[in-house]
Image (cartoon, helix red, strand yellow):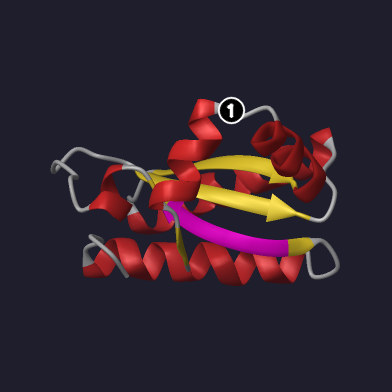
């Protein structure tokens, strides 16, 4: 995976497995973005991840942040997810959201 250490790769893979298990019917994709995806990360950079669910609730977001906490406690890797529903992401694209444009430019599916 782009710009990730072996430990970060393992943490992202574990997070992806847990996402697919917890959200089997809703999981759409997981992408790496930001400095790690661009190959510009510093040693203290976190791992920016874009989580897309078919639809999203507040409880879903809380569950995802619980999974991130588990990964941190097990691997010591800081994952920073941005969670969107597929519809929400498309709406932001339609409004030419700069943040989403940056993600679209840099994102790498994992």
Q: Position of residue 7 (x, y in %)?
A: 27, 65
Residue 29 is at least partly visible in this image: yes
The quarter of the displayed image where residue 75 is located:
bottom left
Residue 72 is at least partly visible in this image: no
The quarter of the displayed image where residue 28 is located:
bottom right
The residue positioned 26% from the left and 61% from the top of the image is 4
Q: Nearer the viewer, residue 19 or 30?
A: 30
Stretch in magenta = 28-32
- The reply, left or right, for residue 40 in relation to residue 59 is left
The residue positioned 70% from the left and 41% from the top of the image is 89
The quarter of the displayed image where residue 58 is located:
top right
Q: Which residue is mark 1?
A: 97
In the depicted structure, whether residue 25 falls above or below residue 72: below
Secondary structure mostly taken by the magenta-highlighted segment of the chain: strand
- The reply, left or right, for residue 42 in relation to residue 77 is left
- Label 1's element? loop
For the N terminus, the image quarter is bottom left
How would you rate the neighbour count of disc 1 (Cα within 10 Å): few for under 14, some for 14-19, many for 20 or more? few
The residue positioned 17% from the left and 45% from the top of the image is 40
The residue positioned 32% from the left and 54% from the top of the image is 37
Q: Nearer the viewer, residue 54 or 24?
A: 54
Q: Position of residue 69 (x, y in %)?
A: 52, 44
In the depicted structure, whether residue 45 falls above or below residue 54: above
Report how many numbered discs are placed on residues in the image. 1
State yes or no: residue 72 in magenta.
no
- The reply, left or right, for residue 42 in relation to residue 63 is left
């Amino acid at each position: 995976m782009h710009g990730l250490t072996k430990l970060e790769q393992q943490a992202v893979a574990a997070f992806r497995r847990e996402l697919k298990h917890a959200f089997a019917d809703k999981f759409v994709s997981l992408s790496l973005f930001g400095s790690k995806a661009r190959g510009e990360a510093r040693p203290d950079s976190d791992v920016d991840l874009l989580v897309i669910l078919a639809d999203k609730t507040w409880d879903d977001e809380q569950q995802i942040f619980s999974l991130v906490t588990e990964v941190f406690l097990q691997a010591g890797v800081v994952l920073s997810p941005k969670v969107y529903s597929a519809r929400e992401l498309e709406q932001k694209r339609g409004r030419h959201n700069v943040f989403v444009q940056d993600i679209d430019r840099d994102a790498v599916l994992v």
